[in-house]
Amino acid sequence: MAIKDEIDAKLRQARKDRDERVINVIGLIKNKVLSELKSAAGVVEDDALWLKNIAAYQKGVVKAMVQFEELGERGAEALDESKFEVAFCEQFLPKKLDESASSSPTTPCRVRPRWDG
């Protein structure tokens, strides 16, 4: 299933459930994608475009979280909302390997032989 289709399905479900947090996050992500589609000539709406915009949105939210943490109790509600948005975005983004998985000896790698000819 394409990312756009997944997001549309989640939006439909959120509307049924009256889940404003999910509706807001999806609206912001869709707006970011639509802005890019309208502004750049030759941009194709595909999974790569959606992933790029979801990652960019998440990165912006993470940057804002630092400021909310500095506000302490005054920024607690915004920080909580930001954590929700980051978690929502993570479900669409590729999973990152943790350090133990990336350095494990079972991780296959290709080595090109060197020919001294």
Image (cartoon, grey):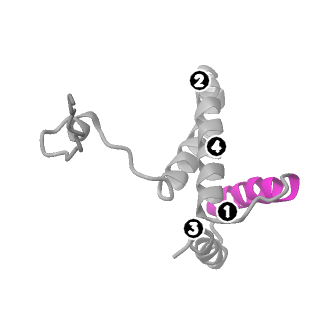
Question: Which secondary structure lies at badge 4?
Answer: helix
For the stretch drawn in magenta, what is the main secondary structure?
Answer: helix
- Residue at the (86%, 58%) spot, across then down: 38
Q: Which residue is mark 2?
A: 72
Which image quadrant: the C terminus?
top left
- Return the disc, 1 or 4, that comes first in the chain's sequence: 1
Q: Is residue 25 left or right of residue 40?
A: left
**How far from the left and from the top, in percent, is residue 92?**
51, 58
**How far from the left and from the top, in percent, is residue 52?**
62, 50
Query: What residue range appears in magenta?
Result: 20-39
What is the spatial separation of the Cα atoms under label 4 and label 3, in whole angstroms? 15 Å
Q: Which residue is mark 3?
A: 3
Q: Amino acid at mark 4?
A: Ala
| Mark 1 touches mark 2? (CB < 8 Å) | no
- Return the disc, 3 or 1, that comes first in the chain's sequence: 3
Q: Residue furthest top?
A: 70
Circle nearer the viewer, 1 or 4: 4
Q: Which residue is mark 1?
A: 20
Q: Amino acid at mark 3?
A: Ile
| Mark 2 touches mark 3? (CB < 8 Å) | no
Q: Is residue 49 left or right of residue 98?
A: right
Circle nearer the viewer, 2 or 4: 4
Any mark on residue 36, and which?
Answer: none
